[in-house]
Amino acid sequence: MILDERMEFADAAVAFGALGHALIGDVIDLQELGRDPGNGEPLFFVVTVDTEIITAGVAGTLRFKLVSDAAAAIAVDGTATEHYVSHDFITDDAAANAPELNAGGVPVAVALPIEGVPYERFLGVLVETVTTATTAGNISAFLTHDVARWKAKPNALGA
């Protein structure tokens, strides 16, 4: 499957900062996709690391969340509806990082939950920095039908 811009949350977006939640990249309007965004087929939520996620010398932890909210400016105060929460990943430097947080890592590749808590209108990705602020790192995040065969469609500049 070719990655479609409508299914992409972030493309090498900044994923570092202070403690707490941060909305990363864009949101997907589920009203345009309907209640079943996969159109009857499984859909996967994937996060890849473009630039390693590190701290300023003190090890910390972070986690990735797939959330929905009634507003496009998804709440970062913990009130957004959580559909997936990753386990905690250790951040430090490339040598001490969880391998998934180094460049080229894939910390998340999971089937989109279709049962359980109902989705609100807007779907997005939060990064929760738990113990120590992070100082560098970029991620890409998207939905795809085939996690094993996804590939990004190059932009007009060939990047």
Image (tube, helix red, strand yellow):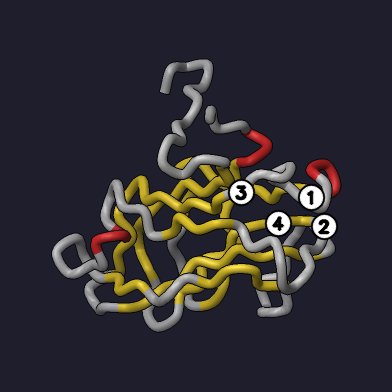
Res. 123 mark:
4
Which circle's residue, 3 or 2, is located before the other in the chain? 3
Q: Quadrant location of residue 66? A: bottom right
Q: Position of residue 140 (x, y in %)?
A: 47, 46
Classed neighbour count for the residue bearing mark 1: other residues with Cα under 10 Å, few (<14), some (14–19), many (≥20): some
Q: Is residue 13 visible?
A: yes
Residue shown at the point (29%, 47%) measured from the top left = 104
Mark 4 against mark 3, which lies toward the viewer? Answer: 3
Secondary element at image label 2: loop
User: Crowding near pointer 2: few (<14 within 10 Å), some, many (20+)?
Assistant: some
| Kind of residue sitting beneath label 2 | Arg
Which residue of the protein is positioned furthest toward the bottom in this rendering? 131
Between the residue at mark 1 and the residue at mark 3, the CA separation in whole angstroms equals 16 Å
For the image, the number of numbered tags is: 4
Q: What's under tag 1, amino acid-wise?
A: Leu
Residue beneath label 3, please? 42
Going by the numbered disc 4, the residue's amino acid type is Leu
Labelled pair 1, 4 in contact (Cβ < 8 Å) = yes
Rendered location of residue 4, percent (x, y):
61, 31
Marks 1 and 3 close (CB-CB < 8 Å):
no
